[in-house]
Amino acid sequence: MFTIRVVDGVARLTGRLDADEAPQALTTLQSLPGPLTLDCSDLEYISSAGLGAVVQTYKRLNAAGQELRIVNLRPNVRNVFTYAGLIRLLQIE
Amino acid sequence: MEERRFARRTRLESLFEFVDAFVVRHGIHTDAAFDLRLALEELFTNSVKYHPESREDILVRLEKDGPWVRMTLQDFDVHDWDVTLAPPPDVDAPIQTRVPGGLGIHLVRHVTDSFEYRHRDRSSTIVVTKRVEP
C-alpha cells in the first residue's frame, strides 16, 4: 500500500514504495509542479524501483530549474538513499 | 525453515507478508526485517526481469540458523546468469548522468552478509545470509 497526498507543494509519501507501486508513484510525481517537497515521515520502505521514481522526478525538476527537497526520512529509508549514493546528491533534510 | 512458491507476476505484498510472518515468528528486529524485505524484493524482481523465458513459480525459502537468516530463491527452467557478477553501478556519478540498472543488486550487497549463486540443470539458486542477532 502506497499513497501520495499533495498539499501546497508538499507531497506526503505514505507506505511502501516498491517495484509494484513505483510506476504509479512516478506518474503522480511527474505531474506535480516545482518547487516540490517530498515529506517522507510516513514512508516505511523504499527499494531501487522507488529510488528510480524519486531520481526521475529530480531530473525533471532540475532540468526546469526547480527544486526538489526530501524531508523527514526514517533511518532505514535514509540508509537506502545512502547506499545508492543519493544522500549527498539530493537535497535531503 | 519456511518456504513458499510465488508466481512470477505475484504482487510484492505477498512476498512481504511471507517475510513479515517469518520475522514475527522468530522475533527478528525491525531493522533486520527491513533489510530482508529489501533483499527479497530486489532478488525476486531481478529474477523475473532477467529470466523472461521461464513460466515457473519462484521458490523462496527462509531459515533461521542461530544469529543468521538464510534466504534462498530458486528459479526453474532458466538460463545461467550469475547475478553476483553484475557490475556495480557508479553511485558517485551525478544524478543527471545516471541510468537505470544494477542498483538493486548493489542494495542487496549492502543489506546482507553473504551472496551466492549457482546454476544446475536449468535451475538457478541464489542464497543470501544476514546476521540478525549480535
Image (spheres, coloured by chain):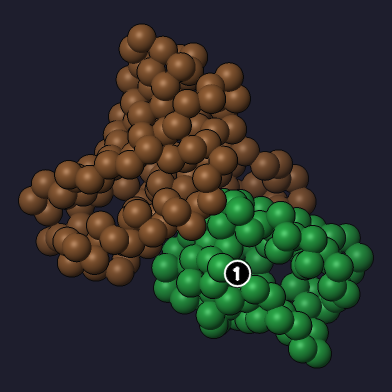
Chain colours: A green, B brown
Q: Nearer the viewer, residue A87 or B112?
A: B112
Q: From this viewpoint, is residue A57 visible?
A: yes
A72 vs B25, left or right, is right
Quarter of the rendering containing residue B27 = bottom left
At 53% across and 62% down in the image, what residue appears? A46
Q: Residues within 10 Å of mark 1 (few under 14, many from 20)?
A: some
Number of on-image labels: 1
Q: Residue at x 50, y 52 (%)?
A: B12
Q: Residue furthest right?
A: A64
Q: Is residue B59 left or right of residue B3?
A: right
A90 vs A55: above or below? below
Q: Quadrant of the C terminus of chain B?
A: bottom left
Q: Residue at x 36, y 34 (%)?
A: B59
Q: Is residue A70 above or below residue B65?
A: below
Q: Which residue carries the number 1 mark?
A: A2
Q: Residue at x 71, y 55 (%)?
A: A23
Instruction: Say what amino acid the circle numbered 1 marks.
Output: Phe
Q: Is residue A1 above or below residue A85?
A: below
Residue A86 visible somewhere in the drawing: no
Res A2 → quadrant? bottom right
Q: Residue furthest left?
A: B66
In depth, the one of A56 and B92 nearer the eye is A56
Rendered view: B78 above or below A27:
above
Q: What x and y, as percent, mark residue B124?
A: 38, 22
Question: Which residue extends farthest bottom?
Answer: A8
Label 1 residue SS = strand
- Where does the image place residue B69, in percent across and percent down from the top left? 21, 48
Q: Position of residue B121 (x, y in %)?
A: 36, 9
